[in-house]
Each structure stands twice: as C-alpha cells, then as structure tokens.
Image (cartoon, rainbow, N blue to C red):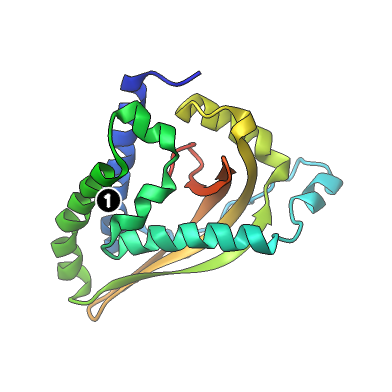
Amino acid sequence: MKVKNSSVKKTVLAALLILSLIVSLLALSSCGNDGAEVPAEVPAELKSEERTKARNDVADDDRTGYIEAIEKYVAYLNGDPSGMKDLRPADFYEELSMTPDEYVELLQKTVDNSRQTNIDTYGEGYGVTYEIKSEKNYDVMLDSLKSTLKEKQGIEPERIEKAYSVCAEFTIKGPKAENARTTYIFATKIDGSWYLVNAAGEFN
C-alpha cells in the first residue's frame, strides 16, 4: 500500500529543505558534531552472536554499488545534482507526478541558493569530500529498517533486499575555512538498485 500523496509531498518538502541546508549546516561550526561521540551502531543488548553477524565483511559487489550512490550524493553537495535522480525509486516520482529531470531541476535551485553563502564562508573553490569510517552488515536490524521504509515511503518489505550501515565523515573545505560532520547512512538495496536512507527512513 502506498502512502497518501499529501504525506509523500510533506516528506519530500522536508527532504528538500534538509538537502538545501546540508552544506549550510556544515558551514556553521556550531552545527557540526566534530568531537562528538559517534553512537553505537549495533545495540549493546543484542546477543553476542547477533553482534558478530552485524560486523560481517561487506560484499565487494555491494560496496561497489553503494559507493557509486554515495559519489552521486557528494557530487550534488559539490553542485551537480544530475545523479540524484537515480537515488529515488520510480514510485517516488509517480507519487509526486514529477519526472526525474524535474526533480533534478528542483535540486539545482537548492544548490544555486546555497552557493553564495558557502563561498562567503569557505571561499571560492570550496568543495565537499567524504571518508568512510566504517561499513557493516545491517542484517540484524533489517526488519526494523523495512518497517520504517514501509511506514515513511510506502515501500513493501519484500522489495528491500539488503542494507549496510555506513559511517561517513563529510568535510567541506575552502581557502577560508573547513568543517566536517560524521553521519550514519543506511545503504539500502531496493528492487536491485542502491539508495541512501537516513535513520528517519528518508532518502538522502
């Protein structure tokens, strides 16, 4: 069952607002979490064998797939949102009556709106890079993620094949300043393609 159109639109509006503010948040020292403790990825109360399973090696093919997705996301943060149309499943666009190209046009506006603010803060030629700190199998908590995605995005659990928890540090740097924030991304395989999901069950 799909979520109601108005609900999806609210989610998209919120997501666009978050996307438009990400680079600006990095621009503010007080908004970064440098030095903050990174939350435990696997709940401590899980049995030891489950904790071990959660730390299984990442399959090479899976890593190639979600790294490509992360690269498209970082390209957006650097001013090129063209690859972002691939980071939303087809029903995302159907619910919004919007084409992938129209979505990219919308994201381009967020890029243009934040560019001058970031030039003022970081200087001309600023850029965003990333470094992966950890990558872990998310099988232990996959049922929870499936439940969240069904509730928030209307995605049926059987469509979700795999997920990895990726801890990544995003750094914005220019001639004037530099800042970083560390965040968890759930690299999730849906209908054979990789997407990036946050803890709230929204697409990055």
Of 34 and 188, nearer the camera is: 188
Q: Residue at x 20, y 65 (%)?
A: 118
Q: Residue at x 46, y 21 (%)?
A: 2
Would you name the residue on which mark 1 appears?
21
Decide if residue 68 is on the left or right side of residue 20: right
Residue 137 is situated, as x and y percent measured from the top left of the image, at 69, 52
Q: How many marks?
A: 1
Crowding at mark 1 (Cα within 10 Å: few <14, some 14-19, many 20+): some
Residue 104 is situated, as x and y percent measured from the top left of the image, at 27, 49
Residue lying furthest right in this view?
49
Residue 38 is situated, as x and y percent measured from the top left of the image, at 56, 56
Of 44 and 71, nearer the camera is: 71
Q: Is any atom of residue 29 visible in this view?
A: no
User: Above or below — where is 84 with respect to 3?
Assistant: below
Decide if residue 67 is on the left or right side of residue 144: left
User: Above or below — where is 85 with respect to 132?
Assistant: above
Q: Is any atom of residue 154 visible in this view?
A: yes
Of 77 and 158, nearer the camera is: 158
Q: Residue at x 31, y 29 (%)?
A: 96
Q: Residue at x 30, y 72 (%)?
A: 127
The amino acid on which the numbered mark 1 sits, given as a three-letter code, is: Leu
Q: Which SS class for mark 1?
A: helix
Residue 50 is situated, as x and y percent measured from the top left of the image, at 81, 45
